[in-house]
Image (cartoon, grey):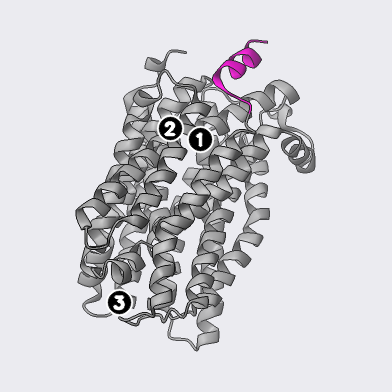
Amino acid sequence: MSDSAISIKEKIGYGLGDTACNLVWQTVMLFMAYFYTDVFGLSPAHMGTMFLVVRAIDAFIDVGIGAMADRTRTRFGQFRPYILWFAIPFGVVCTLTFYTPDFSYTGKLIYAYASYLLLSIVYSAINVPYCAMINNISNDSRQRVSLQSWRFSLSAIGGLIVSISALPLVKYIGKGNIQEGYFYTMMVFGALSVVFFYICFSNTHERYISPVEQNSGSVWRDFKTLCGNRDWRSMFTLNVVNLIAVLFKGGSAIYYCNYVLNRPDISTYLLTTVIISGTIGAFISSRIFKNIDKVKGFKYAMFLEAILLIVVYIISPDMLWLVFCTVILVNVIQGAATPLQWGMISDVVDVLEKESGRKLSGIVFSTNLFAIKLGIALGGAFIGWLLAWNDYVGGSEIQPENAVHTVALLFSIYPAILVFSLVIIMNHYTLNDARLEAITKT
């Protein structure tokens, strides 16, 4: 199948599915830590512990959904039905997660655990099949990178909506009540996500659905197959480490504006800059890396991003223009590398099918999505713990010097170290373009 066989309409339809996901994803990445500490009223330490506990439970949910999706066959396809079934629950639950009940501290902590866990469940139920669906849309590695480029370009629109409108909407709708502002803002985002999911469902086609008999057998057998594969282990580890770095940068951005730059008024501008530059990176990814091996291209990108993050730390906070320029470069690089990363996960599915005779798209993507959410949980937990250990006071306009320095490290040096470690991790991933072509031809 040539790349032209996948229409622009279908590429846009597929990408809008991630626009919907990103309306919640970016809200979690950019605002959830701040929401829980400064709006909802949790202590940073309790917030960090909650992130880890929920993700530990979520691990089993992710794998279960992936295994179930691998064994699903309906008149709507294999993975598409999950988008249809869970679109509305997704919109409702993401709204409830940002509701602040008038409970005691213990009651609010219980509510936070329950709503955040429920959000994780419905997110998995729709996002695992959505991500796995790409291997049923196309069976060509290059075409899938192109689809991923469209996906992350349109995904960034969801992030752009969040970064541009979230804080102004909170202020406008809340009319001085920041708790109500967050709740009704998420109601708007939830409704938009439902619309985008239905457009995605209506405009995508699963062309390469394997026979259901191919996925018979136990989930444990599938899991052992994954654990025995070096390339799956590499991608799992990479996703955990990468998302800790991403969460450090995104989760500390508002703190960085408030306490390092001493410019809380530019939070929206910084977040918007991050999203737009990431969008540009994703859009030009297939052009930049068209003639470069995916593995080499990813390693080059991560090395350069790590260097630029160190530069962010060195720059004086007074030089706002230089801070913004460097942040733009960091996120263009990150956005350009992301389609390569997801393309490599799809390649693991192809190789496992060659080796085992089973197409394990669902469980491969679900375990890697768990790795991503584990990275977010660890990142959020470390943010909470590091702030607590360094005397951060939620809601206070003035923070101690050690807390301010911790925020600066979270936005720059800590993610730089983690991003550089991705280069080392990728040395253990063997599916470069030449080897992948040799395997698929046998």
Nearer to us in this view, 238 or 182? 238
Numbered disc in front, either 1 or 3: 1
Q: Compare marks 3 and 2 and give the one earlier in the sequence.
A: 2
Question: Callout 3 environment at 10 Å: few (<14), some (14 to 19), or many (20+)?
Answer: some
Residue drawn where x is 56% and y is 54% of the image: 375
Q: Amino acid at mark 2?
A: Gln
Quarter residue 279 falls in: top left
Q: Nearer the viewer, residue 297 or 431?
A: 297
| Mark found first going from the N terminus, 1 or 3 | 3
Using the rendered view, name the quadrant where residue 238 is placed: top right
The secondary structure type at the circle numbered 2 is: helix
Checking the image for residue 342, the label placed there is 1
In the figure, is residue 410 to the left or right of 184?
right
Q: Residue furthest bottom?
A: 104
Q: Residue at x 74, y 41 (%)?
A: 223
Is residue 356 visible to us here? Answer: yes
Residue range of the region highlighted in magenta in the rendering: 430-442
Which three-letter amino acid code belongs to the residue tagged 1? Trp
How far apart, in angstroms, are the residues tagged by discs 2 and 1? 7 Å
Above or below residue 398? Residue 350 is above
Disc 1: CA contacts within 10 A as few (<14), some (14-19) or many (>=20): some
The reply to whether the C-beta atoms of the residues labelled 2 and 1 are less than 8 Å apart is yes
Q: What distance separates the C-alpha of mark 3 from that of mark 2?
A: 36 Å
Q: Amino acid at mark 3?
A: Ile
Pick the quarter of the image with the C terminus: top right
**Residue 121 pos. (x, y %):** 56, 57
- Give the residue at mark 3: 178
Q: Secondary structure at mark 1?
A: helix
The residue singled out by tag 2 in the image is 148
